[in-house]
Each structure stands twice: as C-alpha cells, then as structure tokens.
Image (cartoon, helix red, strand yellow):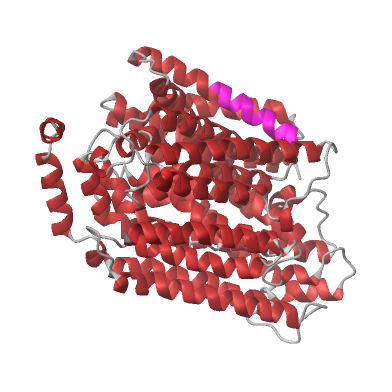
Amino acid sequence: MSDTVKYLILASSFTVLAVSFLIGLWARRKVTSPEAFIGGAKIFGPLTVGLATMAAVGSAFAVVGVPGLVFSTGNAILLFMFAAPAFVFGYLVIGKKVRALAEIGTVASLGDLSDLRFNGHRGIKLLLSIMLFIGCVMYLSAQVEACAKLFENLFDWNKFVIAFVIFAILIAYTVLSGEIGGVLTQAFQGLVIVVAGFIFTASFFAVTGGFGPVLEAIASTETSLDPSALTAWGSLPGAYSFAWVLLPALGIMCQPQVLTRMTMLRTPRELPKLSLYAVITNMITGLMVMAIGYCAIYLVAAGKVVISHPDTAVFKVADYLGIMAQLFVYPAVLAAALSTSSLFLSLAGTIVSRDLSGALGIHLLPARQVTVSRTAMMLMGLAAIGFAALSGDMVAILGTYGFGTLAAATFPIFVIGLLWRRASSRGVMLGMLTALITTLGGISVELLKRFGLTEFAWPGDVPWYVFVLAAAVTVTIAASLLDRAWSDDQLDRRVRMALDL
Amino acid sequence: MIETFLIIASGLLWLLMVALAGAGHWLAGLYALLALLLVYAILGTSHKGRFDLRLVLFPTGVWLLCWAAAFGLGEYFARAYDSGVPTFTIFGFHPSFAAIIALFWVVPTLVMGFGFEAVKDRWLSQKQWDDFLTNVHEASPDQQDDEQA
C-alpha cells in the first residue's frame, strides 16, 4: 500500500471523527439540564434511536470480530449477527414498561430505573454499578483491540499509543456533549456503517461472483479451511452455536445501549418503528460482515491474500478490493468502535458519578459529578486497555464476554423485575450477587487458562457466561419466591401501573 | 398466580436448557430456548394481569416456528454433508446454512419487524398510553404516602 493511500485512508477515518466531534459541539445546544446531559431527555425519534442502537450494539465486535471468526471458524458467529428478531422481541416484551417508568421519575441512568422498580434499594444499585463497570471494561476492550488492529495494519503503530490517543479523543467529545451528543453521533456513525455495508457487499459480488464460488474455492483448493465451516454451525463445537443464539436472543433486550435508548424515545408507540429501523440496518450490517468473512475465505483459498491474524481479515480484504473499499471500510470500523466506546464511556461516568455514589449514600455536587465522571471514564479506558492486553483474545470473543456480563448484570432487574411483580428486592440482590461472584470466577478461570495455570473445561464446552446468566436468573427467582417479607403494597402505585401496561 | 407460575416455568427452562447444553445436547438446548422465549413472550403481552395470546401467536409465534425449522433443517443438512462439500447449493450457500439464512435471519426478521408495526395498536393503543399518563400524573408521590398511611 502506498503512503498516499495510507494517508487518504487516515484522512477519511479522521473525517468520521471530526464530524462526530462537530455533532457533539452542535448537540450542546440541546443540553439544558444535568439530566439531559447524562441521558434524561425524551426527545428523539425512532430513526435516530434506531441507527444509534444498531451502531452501539453492532460495534467493532461486528465489523472486525465477526468477519475474523467467520474466516477462521465459519458460520457459527453469524448466528449472533443474524439474531435481529431479538431486537423486536426485546421492545415487544419490556419496551413499553421501561419507557413507562421514565414517566414516573427522572431516568438518566439504569440505576434510576432500578431505583424506581426496587424503591431505591442501594444494594441492587451498588451491585448493578459494579457489574456494569466490569461488563463495560470487557466490551470496551474489544473496541480497543479493533482500533489497534486498524492502525497496526496501516502504520504499524504501537497498540497502546493508538488506544491512548483514541480514548483521549473519545473522552473529549463524550464530556463535551454528554448523552445527547452521544446518541446523535452514534446515529451518524450507524449511517456510516450502513453506507459501508452497501459498498462492501457490492464489492464482494464483483470479486467473487457470489457465495457459490467461495464454497467451490474451499473444496477445490488445498487450504487449512474446513468445508464444514460453511454449514449452519461452523467448525467450532456446537455449544458455541447454542451460546451465540442464546446470547442475543435473551441478551439484546437488556443491553445498556438498548435499555437506555428506550427511555429516550418521545413515546413508546414509536417503538415498533424504532425496531424496524434497528433490524433493517442490522440486516445490512449482517450482510456486510458475512460478505467480508466469505471474501476473506475466498481470497485466501485462491492464494490472493495472506491473513496472519483473523482480526485483520476485514482490513486485508479491503486492501485487496482497492481504494474505494478502503475509504469506506476503515472509517466504518472506526465509527463502529467509537459509537460503542463513547456510549460505554459515558455509561461508566454515570455509573460512578451518579449510581455508585448514590448507592454508597454520597451526594456529589453537580460540578464535582463532572470531575468524578471524567476520572471514571479515564479509569475505564485504562482498564479496557489492560484487559485487552492481558486476555489476548480475539475481538469477537472479547465482545461476547462483555455482552454476556452485561446481560447477567441487567437481566434480573430489567427482565424478571419488569415481567414479574413478585420479584423482590432481596431476591434480585441475591441474583445480582450470584452474577457478580460467578462472573469473577468465570473471568479468573479464563485468565488462568490463558496463562496455562489450569486445564479446566466448562461442561459441554459451553462458554462461561451462559452459566453465569442461568445462575443469576434462577437464584433471583428462587430467592424471590422464598422471600416472605415481600408485599405487593411495597411497590409505588405508579410503578404498578407501569408494570401493568 | 399465572405470572408466578410462568416465571417458575422460565426458571426451570433455564436450568433444563443449560443442563442439556452442558451435557453435550446443545441442539436440544436450543429448542428449550425457544420454549423459554415463548414464556417471556406470553409474560410480555400481559396487560393488567391478562395475557393476549393473539399477540403471542403473531408475530412472536411465527418467529419461533421459523427458528425451530431453521435449527432442524440446519442440523439435517449439516449431518447429511458432514464429510465434505454438498452435492447442491441454495443461492450458493451450503444447504445447511441456507436454512439459517432464510428461516433464522431474513424471514423472521421481516416478520418481526413489520409484524410488530402491524400489531402496534393491539400492543399499546394511544388510549392505553394516554390513560397511563393521566393516571400516573394524578397519582403524585404525596398521594401515595397518604394512601399508605
């Protein structure tokens, strides 16, 4: 790749960043209160929220990680990407209840929602904050890894320098405009991903002639690629297919980037339109990542490209396709990473400055909240860089860790809690405690395995976060049933109305 | 009572699903997942304690049936051609994966997306929402305290 092309790609990538920054500046005009800054404004329409949600859920996990796993292990991970009906399911099952709670009090964070449902229970809020923080670190580490791969591929820059620069810029624009700017910039970044999706898919058909030639190329060439990789379940153990259907099917509805966006919609009657925009844009992204993965398989099988690490597949394919593809794919990767990172950074700020401090009974003045929030964002950035370096996992695997942890953190409160009035504070707190302990156990086992200190294998090769989720849910239900102190009268009448809606 | 019964059923389905997958029967675990999704779908249609089974049947029921068919066909064709390249493809895809493309992804996504819009009024009518807003704003926290006292 010539230096001119490299700098053109760099310019197009930083154009996305600059436009995001300008949107953040423009959004400041809409920030009229501290609540609006951290996410309490019910002012957005379904298109904006749909694009922003897709971009935040998709993230670099989808654009970098999924094609990498398709290239190395086949179709199994596409089950995760194709589970788009789960978006609609989430809105259908809990959407109106979540949005209704936002009418009862100021809801600027998930902690506020939890307070409303469980009468300001500090223990639940504390555990929720800690779990969200851990989940955010893991999900952010996937974004760090993706950005590092992007710039390593272009300039061979140091991974840590890249991560620090990206996070510095991200923190600047997140601090500048808060969640209002965050939603608008994510919507713009979602649009970039969709445009790249169209261009890449067209390029894929131009290069390969369709999906059939990919299968033929694998069959007729001596490569390490296994033809079974292109069956429904890929070449990984079937337990991964199980986990990668379960995780989005039950987990999308309780991801922070989905839950918080529900409360920002003008009215819940726009949720069906929002879900339509989210799934259509998600389908375009799904088509793009499948095309990238298949294109990588085809080009390697045909001996046209060498891919040394699966996470570089998207860049190697774009480089082969030429300047047009490069000018859209690299910015799309950056947009995907930035949209999710900015959301999780602002979430981290809110967790520490609002939820965690509230749970500990510390009341911070507004000016102090901003300082604490910025510090939390920096700590979160550092923790994500550290986890990415320590775990050494691929982008997609890091993404699923984060996704699973966040689902375990929120499922007892926002799914069981909203669907079942009998879910008691004590039951949910015990469920959350179980989630925290088992998550720490799961991460520890994975890290020990990474350093060769244990050979422990999870039953049936099922990923650890599935056990965490199951344990959290069943303990919540059992403990709530056994809680004799529970009484329906403890619930605020207005909350009962929201749950009955 | 019915809500509690359904939640207990969901807890048992969680245990069954994970136990099946942990024991190596991950495909059976996927079918248990569909039953679990059905339970949550029923709970999600509850309005003032009443369940709306028509809303469960469409679009969610159709979606779950599509997924059940996708898992079955995906597994059938994966086993049929597990030793190598299939004798035929569908739009260039391995037949096992073509079942996923059609019945796991494209059809159910469109059914759920457009179906939800089609049943919007049944799911939440404008009147239900307006009534909720009126009642919530009338029931101020002060009133709550009075009532509880």
The quadrant of the picture occupied by the C terminus of chain A is bottom left
Q: Is residue A135 above or below residue B135?
A: above
Q: Is residue A272 above or below residue A114?
A: below
Q: Is residue A187 visible?
A: no
Q: Main secondary structure of the magenta part?
A: helix
Residue A258 pos. (x, y %) = 42, 47
Which residue lies at the image location 52% right of the left edge and 51% below the top edge? A193
Q: Nearer the viewer, residue B38 or A378?
A: B38
Q: Is residue B83 above or below residue A94?
A: below
Q: Is residue A179 magenta?
A: no
Q: Is residue A389 magenta?
A: yes
Residue furthest to the bottom:
B87
> Where does the magenta region start and end?
A378-392
Q: How many marks?
A: 0
| In this rendering, position of residue A209 left or right of residue A133 | right
Residue A434 pos. (x, y %) = 55, 39
Q: Is residue A304 visible?
A: yes
Which residue lies at the image location 77% right of the left edge and 50% below the top edge? A457
Q: Quadrant of residue A293?
A: bottom right
